Amino acid sequence: MINASKTITDKINEIFDGLKVSWPYFVFSLIALGLLTLMITFLVYKPVKKMLKQRQTFIQNNIDESIKAKEKALETQENIDKQIIEANLKVSNILTEAKSESEKIINDGISKAEKQGEMLIEQANILVEKKYAEFEKVQKKIIVENAVELAKKILKRELKDKDNKKLVQELLES
């Protein structure tokens, strides 16, 4: 076993003996790595970074504009809500005024109708009294004429106007 481990160790030493650092290759590799890093930085990293910055600015501007638009929309909505409230108040006031005006018109109409009704009743009463007086006058005349006729028949003679008037007055008084 010891031989086996020596052989493995020997083999490993042989492999690493062949790997020696060559300073010119090392410096050349560092310079190539630096140039490659600069090329990648200027040709890839900076343009990508610039593009990402522009994209971020674009997105941020859109976010800011949408915030402003939302604020403006909220302000507009608030103004519209205020206008709706004011319009509702105006409508309410107009309805209240219209209601009171209609009640006033109705009350005025009722009072006018009552006054006209009272006037018509008074006129009717006056007319009834007038017609009643005429009727009474006509009836008294008829009664007097009938009384005169009856008196003639009872007395079998013709009465004079003086006697007629006297009899009529007596009848009217009784």
Image (cartoon, rainbow, N blue to C red):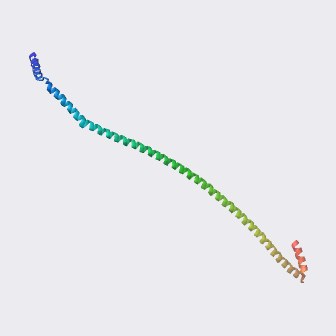
Q: Which percent across, then down, holds residue 17?
A: 11, 21
Vertical order, 27 against 153 (above or below): above
Q: Which percent across, then down, holds residue 83?
A: 51, 49
Q: Quadrant of residue 60?
A: top left
How many numbered discs, if any? 0
Q: Which percent across, then down, holds residue 33?
A: 19, 30
- Residue at horizontal 53%, vertical 48%? 85
Image quarter (top left, top right, bottom left or bottom right) of the N terminus: top left
Farthest-out residue, top: 2
- Residue 174 seen by the camera: no
Query: On the picture, is 95 further left or further right than 115?
Result: left
- Residue at horizontal 58%, vertical 52%? 93
Image quarter (top left, top right, bottom left or bottom right) of the C terminus: bottom right
Vertical order, 49 against 116 (above or below): above
- Residue at horizontal 65%, vertical 57%? 104
Q: In which quarter of the image is residue 94?
A: bottom right
Q: Nearer the viewer, residue 49 or 136?
A: 49
Q: Which percent across, then down, holds residue 58?
A: 34, 42
Query: On the picture, is 57 further left or further right than 87?
Result: left
Q: Nearer the viewer, residue 68 or 87?
A: 68
